[in-house]
Image (tube, rainbow, N blue to C red):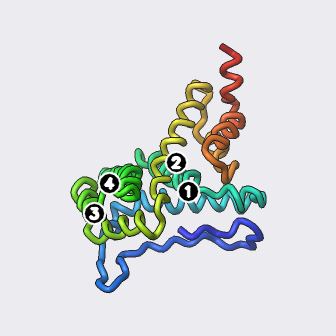
Amino acid sequence: MMPPRLLGNTGEQGEFVLPLSVPGAKEQKYDDFNYDAASWTLTAHEARPGHELQFSTMVEKGVSVARAVFAFNSVNVEGWGLYSEAITLPYMPDDGKLISLQLRLQRAARAFVDPELQTGKWTPESAREFLQKEVGLSPAFATEEVDRFTFRAPAQATAYFYGYTKLMDLRAAAERALGPRFEPLAFHDAILAQGLLPPDLLRKAVLDAVGASEQRAVSAR
């Protein structure tokens, strides 16, 4: 996903390109996405309620220079993408649910395979073998993943699952504080309205916005 520019945007929209090969001296093709069951979770992540809605909201509401320049972070962005897959999973057909859960497993694997490669505890060969055997990725897709971890964007892939868990924790906190007054739509609107913020600042802003301030909850005890 190539997001639209946030400052000075005059109507540009984001672009999503789905590669189906690994470039190089020996081209490797993969088919991990090009079937109907995979389209459900891809649409949820890249389109709506995922990145397209996320960035469209930011463009429509406007983003401060400080946030656009200094606060853009993959934990916020990709965490929302994976969270979007999770909240739409109950509405997917069974084969779509299976692929969505497989791709969530892939993001969980990224959270520890990437650091293990950086520290030298795993080799690229052992990482590729693990992703193929335990996550079910094709050889070509496993190669693309390991290339991404090691030299294309080291550490970025860990952001998906970390951001997802932070949002799930934030939702649990809001549900505990609000009880039956918790409204998923208002909660999601509050997240999107904040645009780009690091997780801890996002948590405080969203809980305040939905009337579930943790300081207020502590004072009420």
Mark 4 → mark 3, Cα distance in angstroms: 14 Å
Q: Are marks 4 and 3 in contact (CB under 8 Å)?
A: no
Q: First in sequence, mark 2 or 4: give its number.
A: 4
Q: Are marks 2 and 4 in contact (CB under 8 Å)?
A: no
Secondary structure of the residue carrying numbered label 4: loop
Q: Is residue 46 left or right of residue 195?
A: left
Mark 1 → mark 3, Cα distance in angstroms: 23 Å
Circle number at residue 74: 1
| Amino acid at the residue labelled 3 | Arg
Q: Is residue 193 left or right of residue 110?
A: right
Q: Is 210 situated above or below 140?
A: above
Secondary structure of the residue carrying numbered label 1: helix
- The residue that appears at 36% across and 58% down in the rendered structure is 117
Res 84 visible: yes
- The residue that appears at 29% across and 78% down in the rendered structure is 28
Q: Farthest residue toward the top?
A: 221
Q: First in sequence, mark 4 or 3: give its number.
A: 4
Mark 2 → mark 4, Cα distance in angstroms: 24 Å
For disc 2, the neighbor class at 10 Å (few under 14, some 14 to 19, many from 20) is: many
Which residue matches tag 4? 121
Between marks 1 and 4 in the image, the one whose residue lies nearer the viewer: 4
Which residue matches tag 3? 128
The quarter holding residue 73 reads bottom right
Between marks 3 and 2 in the image, the one whose residue lies nearer the viewer: 3
Q: First in sequence, mark 1 or 4: give its number.
A: 1
Circle number at residue 163: 2
- The residue that appears at 48% across and 66% down in the rendered structure is 153
Between marks 4 and 3 in the image, the one whose residue lies nearer the viewer: 4
